[in-house]
Image (cartoon, rainbow, N blue to C red):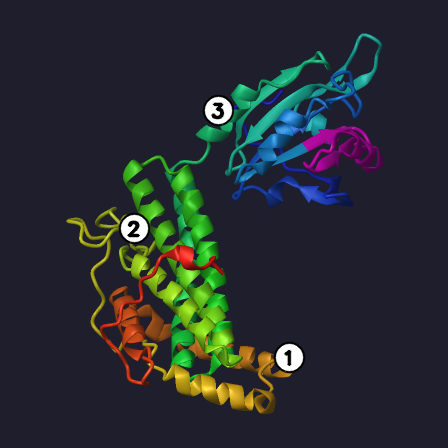
Amino acid sequence: MLEEGARAPRFELPALVDGSFSQVALEEYLGEDVVVLAFIPGVFNPACDDQSSGLEELDLFTVQKDVTVLGISPDSVYSHRAFADAYDLTMPLLADTDREVARQYGLDVVDDLGQHLLERAVVVVDHDGVVAYTWSTSDPSRRPDLAGVKDAIGETGGDDVAFARYRVGHAHYTEGRRAFTAAMGSFNESEWLLAQGDFQQARDEFAAAEDHFDTAARFVDDPDLGTLYDGVRTKSDALYQAADWLAQAANQYSSGNGMAGRTLREDAERRLESARDYHDPPDPDQWPPDGTDPKRGSTEDVLPDAEDGAPATLNVDIDAEVDGATASADERGETDSGAADEANDEGAERRAGAQTDADTIDDEELAAIHAEVEASEPTEDGDANDDRSRDRPDTERGDP
């Protein structure tokens, strides 16, 4: 069998994946997930009984983030389908019918009866394609050492893997800020469909950034960098929620639902305020950062504030626009799919043109957004009220 530290042989095999047949290659997971290869001598093997296939424990690792489990046996994908159905397995099951992969991993054996079999084995492959853990047995009824597998998964990663994930997250975050800037401009001009589309793109980019920053925080060894990664993850999550609520607010305003739009804006304001507590993620091309505390007001700043510029604001007269939207929604056809497609195309052009401006926007402008939103909220008599508080308990309504 392969030794720990060896390069894991690459392979591609027919497989049963989510009930369908396809080709699965080890290469497609490397660099993204820790891969657990579960070799079994065959489906319905001696480890199976009425309740267990012998793979359920390993199958549970599939619910862990950044972990992929692949079952491998010499049986066909058709046999794998019956096996998966019988034991409710979710992992992909790969068909090594000519036993070539088993030979590459040193797991093909000949028993006392002269039968060519696969040993029961578990191989953990890290993000670089290196074997991090192995376990095997010639007794087909034995079960894997789950503690050893769990420890091996927990020990994979490291600062280099974490930084690679951080770099991807930073790229998504940058695109999110660009889309958010374009959305703010559209919102100011009461171009609701454009604003909604751009906020939705910002939301998706911030969600992707948060996911990669979260993985970086889990894989990193350096505790200081762990604090940084966790902080930018928190900031991305706050901006994701703010963009989501602002997208919904634009949709409500375009439909003439001013009260619903204002409620969503108030939620977005609170998330923007939370985002202001953290610096933007440091540029991965200027690594390592001068400091690793992501919070503002700390003695060790991650990034200096950008130069003051014209902030993006939400200074639209909402009540007037809502009245206009109610009167002419049918004429404008804002719910028509053709109008939405045109708005999306124009939004893409806006985002492309907003790249330079977005690069200079820092978190101080989030404060300006918050202040301008408060200032623009009309009172019952139609005048703006700068002093009216927007805070109210979240229990007054369910989150959208």
Q: In the rendered structure, which disc, 3 or 1, sits on the residue that comes first in sequence? A: 3
How far is disc 3 from disc 1 in space, using C-alphas? 52 Å
| Mark 2 residue crowding within 10 angstroms, few (<14) / some (14–19) / many (20+) | few
Element class at badge 2: loop
Residue at 50% x, 30% y is: 153
Residue at 41% x, 48% y is: 213
Q: What amino acid is found at the position of numbered circle 1 in the picture?
A: Ser
Residues rendered magenta in the picture: 71-100
Is 360 included in the stretch rendered in magenta?
no
Q: Are marks 3 and 1 in contact (CB under 8 Å)?
A: no
Task: Tell me residue 60's x, y (percent).
Answer: 61, 31
Q: Is residue 64 visible?
A: yes
How far is disc 2 from disc 1 in space, using C-alphas? 45 Å
**Mark 3 or mark 1, which is nearer to you?**
1
Q: What amino acid is found at the position of numbered circle 3 in the picture?
A: Asp
Residue at 18% x, 50% y is: 298
The residue identified by callout 3 is: 151
Q: Are marks 2 and 3 in contact (CB under 8 Å)?
A: no
Task: Tell me residue 222's x, y (percent).
Answer: 31, 36
Number of numbered discs overlaid on the protein picture? 3
The residue identified by callout 1 is: 337
Specify the label residue 287 is tagged with.
2
Quadrant of image for the N terminus: top right
**Mark 2 or mark 1, which is nearer to you?**
1
Q: In the rendered structure, which disc, 2 or 3, sits on the residue that comes first in sequence? A: 3
Corner quadrant of residue 363? bottom left
